[in-house]
Image: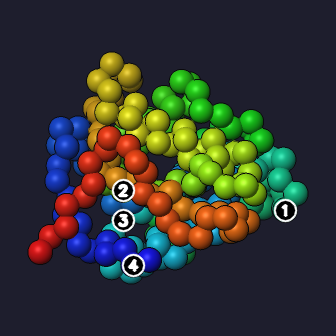
Amino acid sequence: LTIRLDACRRFPHPGDLLDSSHMVDILAIGAHPDDIEFGAGGILAKAVAIGQTVAMCDLTIGQRGSNGTPKVRKQEALAAAELLGAEREFLHFEDCEVSDCSKGRTELARVIRYYKPRLVLAPMFDGVRNHPDHVATGILTRNACRYARFTNILPKTPIHTVDGILHYPRWGDRKSTRLNSSHTDIPRMPSSA
């Protein structure tokens, strides 16, 4: 799969014009520290290499994971973000309890409005071997992108509409071997000639 990140032109959205200080080209979202790196690290490195800006957001710090402590995983995640030149933040969802709910959608919509990305990357929400948090994060992200453009949700924060969402596979999910664009009512990014 070849993604021409440089072929996409950014069109301003109404909320973008009010404050563009934290606008990024790509916002990558993961359930746990290291999910983004395993699922979309190459895409992010390529994007940064061609001059695009990137932010990363982990819903949990992997409190219940069996590989490393939350403190170590967070340090490694911050080091990866620094290597890419990306901003990274951690939300306060509980590991192994991520679910698609109104409160979670609103919290993630706040992050989307803050960074104003044109492209969002999130885990695929299908697959036999996929961790339940990855499935929930994929669905939650898709719905949070919708919430981010609803004027009556977080009414004091300017709305933002992303141009597209790509769902990346997690390394343990052998069923999914390629990126999938989300089939939502969010418009696709136009290609320049």
Confirm or deny contact between disc 3 and disc 1 (CB under 8 A): no
Q: Which corner quadrant holds the N terminus? A: bottom left
Element under disc 2 = strand
Note whether residue 59 is visible.
no
Does residue 177 lie above or below 95 as drawn?
below
Note whether residue 12 is visible.
yes
Query: What is the total number of numbered labels drawn onto the structure image?
Result: 4
Q: Which mark is residue 163?
A: none
Give the foreground label among 4 and 1. Answer: 4
Mark 2–mark 3 Cα distance, whole angstroms, equals: 11 Å
Element under disc 1 = loop
* Mark 4 or mark 3: whose residue is earlier in sequence: 4
Mark 4–mark 2 Cα distance, whole angstroms, equals: 16 Å
> In the visual, does 3 lie left or right of 105?
left
The type of residue carrying mark 1 is Asn
Q: Which corner quadrant holds the C terminus? A: bottom left
Q: Position of residue 144 (x, y in %)?
A: 46, 36
Residue at 17% of width from left, 49% of height from top? 12
The residue pinned by badge 2 equals 119
* Mark 4 or mark 1: whose residue is earlier in sequence: 4
The residue pinned by badge 1 equals 67
Does residue 55 lie above or below 140 as drawn?
below
Mark 3–mark 1 Cα distance, whole angstroms, equals: 29 Å
Give the foreground label among 4 and 2. Answer: 4
**Residue sitting at the far right:** 66
Give the foreground label among 2 and 1. Answer: 2
The type of residue carrying mark 2 is Leu
The residue pinned by badge 4 equals 2
The residue pinned by badge 3 equals 53
